[in-house]
Each structure stands twice: as structure tokens, then as C-alpha cells.
Image: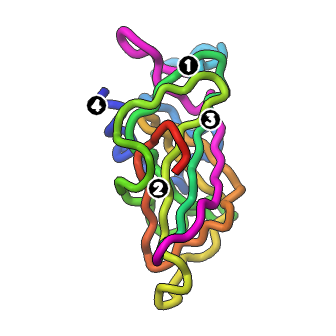
Amino acid sequence: DADAAGAASDAPTSPAATPTGTGTPAEPAPSSPPPTSAAPSASAKPGGIARCETDGLALSLVANGQEMNSKYFDLRLTNTGSEPCDLLGHPGVSLLDAGGKRVGEPATRSQDGTGDGGAVRLRPGQAAHATVKTAGEGVTDGRCWPEAATLLVYPPGSRQTVTTADLAGLKVCGDSFQVGPVGDRAP
């Protein structure tokens, strides 16, 4: 699904103009208001399981240790819906300050972690994992980004966001902020 793999890079790069939490519409707004029924937790995909949508995902970040000159974090997207769904590719990741303005630049893509770029099928309650990596504060010249208040994530293939205020001690230093593709197990 090329659309799912590329959407994280197509995601807006200015979250300050994007409401956090439920995100922005995935498609341009229709000329008439949309129906008021609840949105499904996934988008239908021809011949298979639907792509995971933000209203059926919970976000968490867990510190995963330090190796050499880098700190690692496990970004988890958990299926909170009642049906299986798929994620494919890299999430879009940014940090926001307490006022909702972006801190630094969005994370760049890497190949760190357990994901190989293939689809991850999530049954209800299961999580997909992506590795977030930054330089350790002690190995840089001391230049670190201002403290963030919120982690904002565009799940792969989505233009809507999920957020968490629990940053698990994430502090970006040395202008090094990377995210790997989703995988089916923690790094």
C-alpha cells in the first residue's frame, strides 16, 4: 500500500497549525458538513484488513535505554478498537511545547528498531512499535532543544494525530531526532 507508506512524509510539518489529540481531516473538507455519526476506527483497504486510524489507537512512549552515544525510546501505537487493523511504514513524529508550538524539527526517518518496513497487523489490544532515537546529552556540545510538553505522532498512512504528554524523559540533543518504521515487537 504505497499510500500508507508515504503518508507520514506527506503529513503537515507545522503541528502548531494542527489541533492535537484527534488531529486534522485526512481528506480535504467536503463542501457540505459531514454526517455526525461516529467515525470508524480504520479505513477499508481492498481485499483485506483496514488501516489503523487515530480514533482506534493509543500512543505511549517508553524509555528503552542508552547505547554508545544514543538514547532509545519505544514508541507504541496500541489498537484500542474492536477489529484488527494494519500499520505500514514510518510514523511522523514531532514535539510540541506547552503552548502547542513545534519544538525543533520533526523526526527524520531511520531504519532503527525491529520494523522491516512491512505491514504490522494489530489485533485489538496489540501494539506496534517504532524506535525513537536521539543523541545523549553528555555526548553533544550541550545543545539540546527546549523542553517539550507533548509528543505528537501521525501514525503511518494517516494525516490525523495522536498525542501523549508522557515523554518518558525524551530530550532531543545535538539536533539528532530519528524514528524507525513500525514493527510487531519492542526493540
CB within 8 Å, label 2 to label 3: no
* Residue in front for this viewpoint, 25 or 113: 113
CB within 8 Å, label 1 to label 2: no
Observer-side mark, 4 or 3, equals: 3
Q: Which residue is mark 3?
A: 78
Q: Secondary structure at mark 2?
A: loop
**Secondary structure mainly formed by the magenta segment:** strand
Q: Is residue 43 magenta?
A: yes
The x, y position of residue 177, in whole percent, is 45, 66
- Distance between mark 4 and mark 1 Cα atoms: 20 Å
The x, y position of residue 141, in whole percent, is 47, 90
User: Which amino acid is tagged 2?
Assistant: Ser
Q: Which residue is mark 1?
A: 84
The x, y position of residue 43, in whole percent, is 48, 19
CB within 8 Å, label 4 to label 1: no
- Distance between mark 3 and mark 1 Cα atoms: 11 Å
Task: Determine which of the numbered discs, if any, sits on residue 14 in the image.
Answer: 2
- Distance between mark 4 and mark 3 Cα atoms: 22 Å
